[in-house]
Image: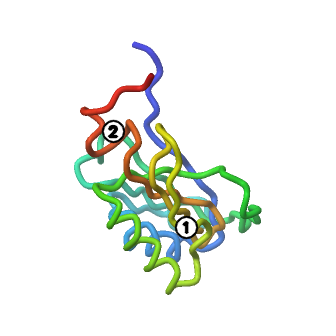
């Protein structure tokens, strides 16, 4: 069997703040919580993906200080441009919008960027050949 990406593990400065962020903005939920290394370790997943891909959030990390033009990010696909706009408005009100919604040529599509409480950037997109509607698109 070839390697399969199953999780990303992140040390974050505030686990609870990150859990709240990923619940609110990404519709992820806590699927496992345990004590470890003197604090709580949390596993989060999207509904239905609990056995295929998770985020592991661990205490003790430093806040990341990324530049606005740093495009390192986690990517989440949405079902419409209106959903991208809605996330951007929520993030604007919460003070964590990094990239205003914008349109770019295929395969990038329509997207915005949000900063999580640990400083990681999270992209929300529509129109990429990944996620909802991808079965109707093909990479060139």
Q: Spatial distance from mark 1 to mark 2, Cα to Cα?
A: 24 Å
Please report the residue visible at 32 percent of the width from the left and 54 percent of the height from the top. 46
The quarter of the picture where residue 135 lies is top left
- The residue where tag 2 is placed is 52
Label 1 with label 2: CB-CB less than 8 Å = no
Residue 89 lies, in percent from the top left, at 44, 79
Image coordinates of residue 106 in percent, x first then y, are 47, 38
Vertical placement of residue 105 versus 27, above or below:
above
Q: Residues within 10 Å of mark 2 (few under 14, many from 20)?
A: few
Q: Nearer the viewer, residue 123 or 34?
A: 123
Closer to the chain start, of discs 1 and 2, is 2
**Residue 75 got which mark?**
none
The 10 Å Cα crowd at callout 1, few under 14, some 14 to 19, many 20 or more, is many
The C terminus: image quadrant = top left
Dot 1: element: strand
Task: Tell which of 106 and 131 is nearer to you.
Answer: 106
Q: Is residue 121 left or right of residue 35?
A: right
Q: Quadrant of the N terminus?
A: top left
Assign a secondary structure to mark 2: loop
**Which disc number belongs to residue 114?**
1
Q: How many marks are shown on the rendered structure?
A: 2
Left or right? Give the position of 38 relative to 66: left
| Residue 28 drawn at (x, y percent) | 35, 61
x, y percent for residue 27: 33, 64
Q: Residue visible at 53% across and 51% down? A: 74
Task: Please name which of the two marks, 1 or 2, marks the residue nearer to the observer.
Answer: 1
Closest to the observer, 84 or 96? 84
């Amino acid at each position: 069997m070839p390697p399969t990406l199953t999780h990303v593990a992140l040390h974050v400065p505030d686990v609870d703040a990150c859990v709240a962020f990923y619940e609110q903005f990404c519709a992820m939920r806590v699927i496992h919580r345990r004590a470890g290394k003197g604090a709580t370790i949390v596993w989060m997943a999207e509904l239905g993906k609990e056995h295929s891909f998770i985020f592991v959030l661990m205490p003790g990390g430093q806040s990341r200080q990324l530049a606005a033009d740093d495009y390192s990010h986690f990517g989440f696909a949405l079902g419409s441009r209106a959903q991208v706009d809605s996330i951007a408005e929520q993030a604007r009100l919460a003070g964590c919008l990094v990239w205003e919604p914008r349109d770019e040529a295929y395969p990038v599509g329509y997207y915005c960027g949000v900063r999580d409480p640990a400083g990681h950037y999270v992209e929300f997109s529509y129109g990429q050949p990944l996620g909802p509607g991808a079965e109707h698109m093909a990479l060139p």
